[in-house]
Image (cartoon, grey):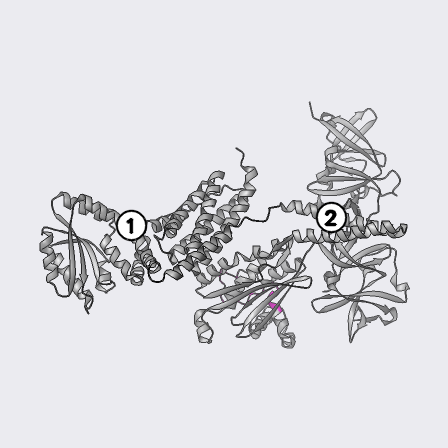
Amino acid sequence: MGEELKVIVFKLGEEEYGIEVDKVQTIERMMPITRVPKTFSFVKGVINLRGVVIPVIDLRGRFGLPESEYTDQSRIIIVTANDMEVGFIVDSANDVIDINSDIIDTPPDVVGGVKAKYLRGVARISEERLLVMLNLSEVLNRSEIIQLESLEG
Amino acid sequence: MDMNQYLSMFIDESNDHLQALNENMLELEQAPDDIGIVQVIFRSAHTLKGMAATMGFEDLSSLTHQMENVLDLVRNEKLKMQDFIFDTLFKALDALQDMVEDITEGGEGKSDVSSIVASLQSIVRGDFASGGAAETSAAAPAAEQAASSAGISLDQYQYSVLEQSISEGHSVLYINVSIREDSQLKAARAYMVFDLLERYGDIVKSNPSVQDIEQEKFDRSFSLYYITQKEADELQSMIMNLSEIESADVTQLDHETLEQLASAPKEAAATVAAEPEQKKAEGKDAAPAKAEQKKAAAHHHGSAMPSRTIRVDIDRLDVLMNLLSEWLIDRARLEQLASEVRRSDLIETVEHMSRVGSDLQNIVLKLRMVQIDTVFNRFPRMVRDLAKSLDKKIDLIITGAETELDRTVIDEIGDPLVHLLRNAVDHGVESTSERIAAGKPETGTVNLRAFHSGNHVFIEIEDDGHGIDRDKILKKAISKGVVTESEGAAMKDEEVFMLLFASGFSTAEVVSDISGRGVGLDVVKTKIESLSGVVSVESKLGKGTKFSVQLPLTLSIISAMLIKVGAEKYAIPLSSIVETGLIQRSQIRQVHGYTMIPYRDAHIPLLSLASLFDVPDYDENAEEESEIVVVRKGDRLAAVSVEDFIGQSEIVIKNLGKYLPAIQGIAGATILGDGQVALIIDPNAFIK
């Protein structure tokens, strides 16, 4: 019997993703973002979250998905992992569910265009509903970005 | 019991005590007879021992215990401080420091201190001074006599020989011979006594030793243990028959008296040294002695004053600082709203709140200020040790130790200063012989000064050594390819000296373990610049060298000029702005591929912020005039073109978060009155 997990559910396109609730600090509506020059295109800039400056990344851009216009539904999920605070811009975030870690399966190579190494697994909640669990420490892995940068540059 | 909660307190207090010990030891070294200081030292050591024992750090407490034993003898005037004791105590302090550091880093504070413990114990036993005994006796002739009458210390072997002789029915004698004061040939007379005695028995041990007596290294009396078949009276008359002998006390020893005599000297030797001091104090100089006591008492009083400070975790101060900066942002917002609403009582309240807020901000900033003494206080010890190991004589004069600096700066400035000081001691001040040859005082002086000036704190390290040899540096720089010969010839002295800070540059002819470790002054420069500081050198050949370090008072709040480019706002630190101005775009020239503008009598490069930062919605080329900010790095200038000036403001520096890699030209971020984040520009990055 696995452990019970509380998961924040958010959407990128039609796909639903999940992050454990204890990694999430808050969920914010879109707010003014100050652009930071000379950095990766998916880094949208920094925001003022109650006096703390926090970098914000577009999760679509991070996964190499096409970026889209922000809407009323767009949210910034502030997560804390590896000692870093980062905001994720997602298409929408509106659900918290309980799942059992037993129902998380190892992910196939690519899910909805997202590489498997960014994923912790796929949870089948019901017949037609799949939840892709993120591997936060990989998503926030800076060494990979720095490599990427040197390849591009 | 879980001791973890007490650990940080223990570490803090141990460091305090160690620091106090170090300082007081140095003070004592200057005034070895001041028992008052010894009392203070003793108490610190005692407290440290108690704390260490409570926390279960056995090694720490046992070493302090040994130190305490030595100090106890000194305190009770049974032992006189001298070089060997100082060195051993300092070594012990170092070992303690290492242990506490180990504990700080999560270790158990274990360390092999057996050699230090052994020397401390030998000091307590009083037998360390075999070499120093002659000195002591020369300094205190009265002491010598006391020692001789009190007996001679015997080692175990000698003791057992004597004891056995008594058991076997030989007569064991303790003989004390005094030679007449007017004798010209004391050594010869003593030799005659030895010669006589050796004919009739065996000398087991003499004090002073036979060698010392032969070299006339004794006052006028000596004593010895002697095994013979003769009677005591007979021997006495035989000795007295020799010429120029004043007296000869011959005592027949049995088991009991032997034991007494053999054990007495340990204490006697210790008391002896202190005795002349006591006599002097008891004698006609009673008044100064009293004054001295008073001084000692005052000393105690000073250190016993209850402390008016409390310890606060630095994290809590940081939280307070963060809360305050959030509040500052709200205040700016409120001021803006109040000016829009235009209700006089609201404006009044907001104004009052602003004033209170400014005071609050000052206080909080002050809380973060730490006296630079916390960095300086370890230097006297360091310089003493360095000078000793280099066999130089150096006075370190510290002024302005009470100057205050932000805690963050204090934490970082220690290492660069250590480097500069080591440099001054090692390379700056000449060896004693060189100094004498140059007609300078034998003892070199290193001045360490700290003082406030404007929004900056200056730290200067000045030595009176041989100064920097311009030609030597140039030669080296040319050979290393740092500059060409013609460039070098055109350079001003200051520019040449700044070459010292170029990376991989070390001019010491001999690589010593003190400052020539490959990493040179370039590391110092990098570190100081990372603290937004500046370092410079002045030097006169033959006169000395002065390193000046200029540091900002605080790193968390700065004055800045806010500017606008397109829809974006940026802050430029006022400290690097020379002036702001307006130029006609027609004045812009292209020189060797650089964009230059005329400024004063020269041309300076013009950089466009919009293009440096790829600002999307602004094209300055469409304008006729451009606002420029002239910035400075060292003595190089550059102009940065912007769209508009917003105004000057005090801003709170925040970092961009760990996730973002360091971005060239951006020093951090701040939050403006409207709640938006503005990036802080680091103009230094634009000037190459």
Q: Residues within 10 Å of mark 2 (few under 14, many from 20)?
A: some
Q: Chain of mark 1?
A: B
Q: Secondary structure at mark 2?
A: helix
Chain under callout 2: B
Q: Nearer the viewer, residue B190 or B501?
A: B190
Q: Position of residue A61 (x, y in %)?
A: 81, 44
What's the residue type where badge 2 is placed?
A: Leu
**Above-or-below relation of B456 to B156:** below
Q: Residue at x 53, y 46 (%)?
A: B13
**Above or below, B147 relative to B59:** below
Residue bearing the label numbered 2: B324
Image coordinates of residue B288 in percent, x first then y, are 40, 62
- Answer with the quarter of the image where residue B522 lies: bottom right
In the image, taking residue B101 as reference, residue B490 lies left or right, namely right
Region in magenta: B498-516
Q: In the rendered image, which residue does mark 1 sit on?
A: B266
Q: Are marks 2 and 1 on the same chain?
A: yes
* Res. B233 visible in picture: yes
Q: Is residue A50 left or right of residue B86?
A: right
Task: Name the residue type under label 1.
Answer: Lys
Please report the residue visible at 46 percent of the width from the left and 49 percent of the height from the top: B95
Q: Judge left or right: residue B454 versus residue A59.
A: left
Q: Nearer the viewer, residue A15 or B107?
A: B107
Q: Which mark is residue B165?
A: none
| Residue B632: x %, y % from top left | 73, 66
- Disc with the residue nearer the chain's start (2 vs 1): 1
